[in-house]
Amino acid sequence: MTGNLSRLAGSTLNIVQLSIWKSNYELRYNDEILGTITRRSIFVPGVILKLFNKEWEIYRPGFWSLETAVKEKGRENPFATFKRKFFSREGMVYLPKGKRLKIKLGVFRGKYGIYDQSGKCLVIFKDKISFKSNTEVTIEEPSELLDEYPWVIILAWHLARQKKRSGAAG
């Protein structure tokens, strides 16, 4: 499958943990594997995403940073960042060419979404309860931004997982 997520509008994808003992995941559409998600390392928080024959890294640039950055694997500098205000459940993804997407993590931990600048919901996430992590990802609307930046789906999922972990710890 090519990087055109708009053709999946109205469809549900799944982010599935492969083993309860490891932090390896797959993004699936029906039985087709669209991409893989691997934790960087125990000492370097973040994930490596392989999707549509490209690789990206999603990471926090510094320990105290509220930002999350995205860069192509092997590159030095990030080309996109997610910024949120302290204690806020939403933030903005700053993309190249001045484009933006909003990620709302929601009041209830199991539901969150990606919205365009006009407030239209593009993607909705719903965490399923099971021994292994499983998240339903429904693409609500076609979007050129999702086609151009498909990694934003994994960014939103990653941010929700971080928020859930920090809430469980404190």
Image (tube, rainbow, N blue to C red):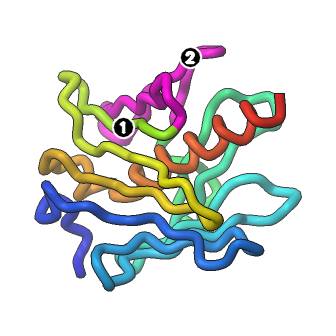
Which residue is located at x 49 percent, y 28 percent? Answer: 108
Within the magenta stretch, is there residue 92?
Answer: yes
Residue placed most toward the observer, 108 or 125: 108
Give me the disc on residue 75: none
Residue placed most toward the observer, 35 or 78: 35
From mark 1 to mark 2, how far is it between C-alphas? 14 Å
Q: Is residue 142 found left or right of 18 in the rendered image?
A: left
Give the image location of residue 91, x and y in percent.
47, 25
Which residue is located at x 46 percent, y 57 percent? Answer: 135
Label 2, secondary structure: give it: loop
Which residue is located at x 16 percent, y 63 percent? Answer: 8
Give the image location of residue 123, x and y in percent.
28, 45
Label 1, secondary structure: give it: strand
Give the image location of residue 167, x and y in percent.
72, 31
Give the image location of residue 104, x and y in percent.
42, 28
Q: Are marks 1 and 2 in contact (CB under 8 Å)?
A: no
Which quadrant holds residue 129?
A: bottom right
Amino acid type at image mark 1: Gly
- Mark 2, Cα crowd under 10 Å, few <14 / some 14-19 / many 20+, is few
Which quadrant holds residue 120?
A: top left
Q: Earlier in the sequence, mark 1 or mark 2?
A: 2
Quarter of the image with the C terminus is top right
- Mark 1, Cα crowd under 10 Å, few <14 / some 14-19 / many 20+, is many
Q: Which residue reaches farthest right?
A: 43
Provide the residue designation for mark 2.
88
Residue placed most toward the observer, 132 or 163: 132
What range is drawn magenta here? 81-109
- Marks counted in the figure total 2
Q: Is residue 27 found left or right of 9 in the rendered image?
A: right
**Picture layout, residue 130 above or below residue 21:** above
Quarter of the image with the N terminus is bottom left
Give me the disc on residue 113: 1
